Amino acid sequence: MRGLFITLEGTEGAGKSSMIPVVKRVLEESGRQVVCVREPGGTPIAEKIREILKTPADEKLNDKAELLLMYAARAQLVETVIRPTLAKGVDVISDRHDLSTIAYQGGGRKIPLSLIDKARQVALGDFHPDLTILMDIDPYVGMQRAKGRGALDRFEQEQMAFFERVRNTYLDCAKNDASIVVVNAALDLKTVTYQVESVVKGVLAHAHAVA
Ligand code: TMP
């Protein structure tokens, strides 16, 4: 049986990273093996691409180049790690995946979705997650949290309007895709953890029912 592919999404400071161990624990408690990755990154080559994407530089990174670098990193990770791992029956949790590109390059940078889809087809074909947990938070609140983590990266230096567009695009996508579950990330940690646990247990119950 193929493993489950679960992704976490959200704007800066939404708390994705603290929910990854929660998702992992729920999966492992039901006897499953789990591999965790992040995007952009997750392989030595993809991590080099991450450096280019995240590091502020004098030369402005062109929006189309940014889009293609995201997909270059994703293709490398999917082909060398994610697909082979799922094929072995092991679950994969990814800190961000393709929905980030729709939200950030589509919503944030305003690249037409028809163009994004062409790049997506090259990199991924029809590969997509079984479950996406969208950690939703007011970007202003999230950014206050992110600022507490130290120097801001190339994305974190964007204006608030950019993150508002990213958030709205995420929420629009969730309305039209049942595999995306929105979690209110502004609530206290205990409540958010409970919500995330419930979502994962629901997907596990479904996976076991169809197996
Ligand atoms: P993070 O891993 O710390 O969240 O940083 C990744 C940054 O890259 C974050 O600002 C979102 C951005 N990003 C995109 O713009 N498009 C993408 O497809 C992905 C995966 C990330």
Image (spheres, rainbow, N blue to C red):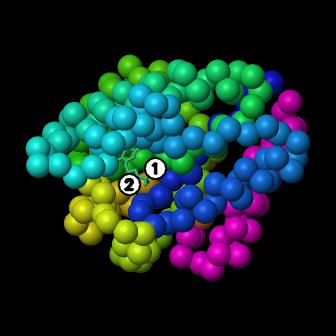
At a point 80% along the width and 24% down the height, the residue shown is: 1
Mark 1: amino acid:
Cys
Callouts 1 and 2 close, C-beta under 8 Å: yes
Q: Residue at x 54, y 65 (%)?
A: 15
- CA–CA distance between discs 1 and 2? 6 Å
Residue where numbered disc 1 is placed:
173
Q: Is residue 134 magenta?
A: no
Q: Quadrant of residue 11?
A: bottom left
Q: Is residue 33 above or below residue 80?
A: below
For label 2, the crowd category at 10 Å Cα-Cα, with few meaning under 14, some 14 to 19 and many 20 or more, is some
Provide residue 138's location: percent of width, then percent of height: 42, 73
x and y, in percent, of residue 9 in the image = 51, 53
**Can residue 203 be found in the magenta stretch?**
yes
Residue 180 shows in the view: no
41 over 182 or under it: above or below: above
**Quarter holding residue 168:** bottom left
Q: Which residue shows up at 42% across the image and 32% down it?
A: 46
Could you tell me which secondary element the residue under label 1 belongs to? helix
For label 1, count other residues whose C-alpha is less than 10 Å away and answer few (under 14), some (14-19) or many (20+): some
Q: Which mark is residue 13?
A: none
Q: Would you place residue 120 above or below residue 21 in this image?
A: above
The amino acid type, in three-letter code, at marker 2 is Thr
According to the picture, the residue beneath numbered tag 2 turns out to be 169
Magenta residues span 184-211
Q: Toward the viewer: 119 or 44?
A: 44
Quadrant of the frame with the C terminus: top right
Q: Residue at x 45, y 67 (%)?
A: 13
